[in-house]
Amino acid sequence: MSDRSLRAGRLATFVYFGLNGFLLGMWIVHIPGIEERAGIGHAVLGWLLLLLGAGAVAGMQITGPLTDRVGARIVVPLSAVLCSGALILPGLAANAWTLGVALLVLGIGNGCLDVAMNAHAVQVERGYRRPVMSAFHATFSIGGVLAALAGARTLGWGWSPAATLGLSALSGVAVAVLAAPALLRSGGARPRDTAARGRPETPRRIWMLAVLALMVMLCEGVANDWSALHLRDGLDAPAATAALAYGAFATAMTAGRLLADRVAARFGPVAVLRYGAGTAALGLAVAALSPWVPMALAGWAVSGAGLSGCVPQLFSAAGHHDRGAVGANVSRVAGLGYLGMLAGPGIIGPLTHAMPLNLTFFLPVALCVIAASMAGVLRTPTTVPDGPPAPDAAAGTAGARRGGGRG
């Protein structure tokens, strides 16, 4: 491919990651208002979030193999249109049943877009032959920050969730269509190496990466789905201020992901996951125990910074494992990961019957600690054919091979 088409493809990937972050962020900041309109409590909301997660996982498992067959150039824009159009549905829900259907459809759209755009990101990263995945995930976080700011502003103006989400949905469809021509054409998938060599279709390492993704992304999901409610209900913050909890988390995650490629090249992916997850555990504990809004915001920010570099390393490792099964492998890791991110927080709702909301956050604290202890799974002594070099456990070797070097 030409340098010009590669740059255009990279820019288009940034656009779709940012769009996905914005769409999901607009849903997140309007959760309190949607919950009130539907007339449900935290526990019911927690169960309904299971439908959001189930839809996402289903969409991922369908889209992964489809992307390997027909190419991300076709699947990415179609998925983005579906995700954008589905955004308005939660804003129109008037009860638990209609909200459940809305979340299921939104989850399917989000799952399809997530796998397709990550598969395209692997294709771009292979073209550049250096780590660029964290930068894409940083753009996802930027979309979340913009959503937090826009949501806080429209809430201050008194706009209804339906009005804001409807306008966002129309804008998302337009962006998805306009960015499509710049996506890279598929170079043609090779026969799956694993099948050709008679090995199991899903290697053990992929499943281990998937388990790590589940734990790390469950912690992200807690911040996404419960941070605003934590400030509003636990610390009596106004709705507009409560929306900034997710904004603080997403802003810190963005900053971390903008640096994560260089950090991974210098210190290796194991260090990124180990120390990142440990930092996230500390931040979540601070947010849970804080009696003051500013300190709670700081805790959410620290947790976002810690988690920022973890997921891009997992997705990149899965995508480069087998060039002929990029979409399938990413869908497996992303599927379990988003089961944690979108469905895992549903556990928090029922736990609020037994303890205050802030104390339930010690579940993700424990998972962060476990993920940090399992970081050695990312260590690999091999390089990946036709892709960026796989980071060594030794930081100096990794930095030397990359020349000093997502989200």
Image (tube, rainbow, N blue to C red):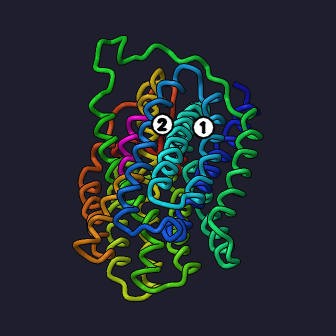
Query: Which residue occupies the foreground of this view, 111 or 142?
Result: 111
Q: Which residue is mark 2?
A: 59
The image position of residue 43, as x and y in percent, is 34, 65
Q: Nearer the viewer, residue 395 or 344?
A: 344
Pinpoint residue 338: horizontal percent, then vertical percent: 41, 47
Q: Main secondary structure of the magenta part?
A: helix
Name the element at disc 1: helix
Label 1 or label 2, whichever comes before in sequence order: 2
Q: What range is drawn magenta here? A: 330-341
Residue 335 among those drawn in magenta: yes
Residue located at (54% from left, 19% from top):
69
Numbered label tally: 2
Q: Secondary structure at mark 2?
A: helix
Rounded to the nearest angstrom, the CA distance separating label 1 from label 2 is 9 Å
Q: Which mark is residue 101?
A: none
Quarter of the figure that contains the N terminus = top right
